[in-house]
Image (tube, rainbow, N blue to C red):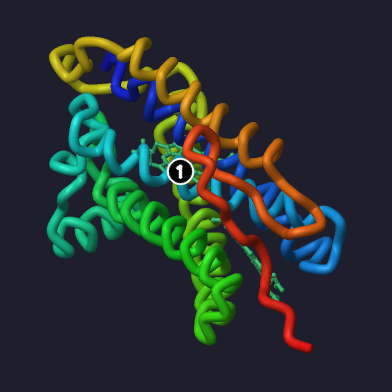
Amino acid sequence: MSKALVWDYPTRLFHWALTVGFTIAFAIAVLAGHRSAWFPVHMILGLALGVVAVLRIIWGFVGTRYARFGSLLFAPTALAGYLRGAVTGQAPRFAGHNPGSAYATFAILALTLITAGTGLLMSRDVEAAEELHELAAYALAAVAVVHIAGVAWHSWRHRENLAASMVTGAKETEAADEEIASPRPVAGIVFALIIATATVGLFRNYDQQRHETKLPLLGTPIHLGEEEHH
Ligand code: HEM
Ligand code: HEM
């Protein structure tokens, strides 16, 4: 067993951006509520999370080996077999995603897009948007909790600090040829700049009176929050 680089910089960047953004957006919605002065932060971080999810999806087609969706495609039977093995300790190890974390990845990306999209639709007065928004957000929280429990379970079972692998990019693997060729630093910097520009721009363009912000660079206005009925 040896350490091999499996997660490139963009994948690690997307992961921690999602984790931090989701935690803050969710906490504001649940703890402070939509009448609090903090709520614009909820909506703007939510939009930024939508941007992160879209970038991660693009990276799923052009990124390195384990970031590509092709390496995340497992049959449902493989998932069932893996979960059975995970409980009994018989599951084989995977350099990149295992079937469990692969399904979780698709679920988290889809739910993030649905949550951000329905958040936007609320201002357009789409009836079902609010219900779907809460449903998707709580489903996302549930998947995240199971995901973190899975990471903790694996770390304990295999005596390996899996959380650290999402920081350093390196994971214990069976064979040395499983390593990715490059962590793609330039792509990582470009994605970091895009995410930072989008997030800072959305905050700076926010107009409290009009409940509106503008897309950075493009200037497209985005109305935020529910349409008020009088
Ligand atoms: C502090 C808490 C967290 C830790 C320690 C953690 C750790 C990890 C680790 C180790 C992996 C790689 C799994 C593997 O080896 O197959 C991973 C993947 C992933 N995690 Fe987390 N995670 C945390 C929170 C979250 C949250 C809150 C979200 C989403 C809301 C999330 C979304 C994801 C996604 C989408 C992936 C797939 C990575 C990709 O291929 O893009 N994680 N996480
Ligand atoms: C992926 C990111 C997001 C997450 C995780 C999230 C999560 C949540 C949650 C959990 C609630 C319900 C709070 C409660 O229990 O009452 C909520 C409500 C709300 N969210 Fe989001 N949200 C996200 C993105 C957005 C975006 C992008 C917008 C708007 C642009 C938005 C606008 C709202 C509004 C207006 C409500 C209040 C609905 C109401 O109770 O009347 N959210 N969000």
Question: Residue furthest toward the right?
Answer: 37
Looking at the rendering, in which quadrant would you find the N terminus? Answer: top left
Give 230 or 160, whichever is nearer the viewer.
Answer: 230
- Examine the image and state in which quarter residue 181 appears: top left
Tell me: residue 82, above or below residue 130.
above
Judge whether 138 appears above or below 196 on screen: below
For label 1, the residue is 51
Q: Quadrant of ligand 2?
A: bottom right
Q: Residues within 10 Å of mark 1 (few under 14, many from 20)?
A: some
Q: Secondary structure at mark 1?
A: helix
Q: Residue at x 83, y 61 (%)?
A: 32
* Residue occupying the point 31% across, 14% down: 184
User: Tag 1: residue type?
Assistant: Val
Depth order, front residue of 8/115: 115
Residue at 18% across / 12% down in the picture? Answer: 176
Residue 110: image x %, image y %? 37, 59
Residue in the foreground of this view, choosing between 111 and 214:
214
User: Is 93 placed left or right of 73 in the picture?
Assistant: right
Q: Nearer the viewer, residue 79 or 183?
A: 183
Q: Where the C terminus falls, by quadrant? A: bottom right
Q: Is mark 1 within 8 Å of ligand 2?
A: no
Q: Position of residue 209 (x, y in %)?
A: 81, 57
Horizontal relation, residue 130 to residue 160: left or right: right
Could you say where residue 97 lies in the image, as x and y percent from the top left? 28, 39
User: In the image, is 38 to the left or to the right of 100?
Assistant: right
Could you tell me how many numbered marks the image carries? 1
Residue at the image position 18 percent from the left and 27 percent from the top: 65
x, y percent for residue 168: 45, 17
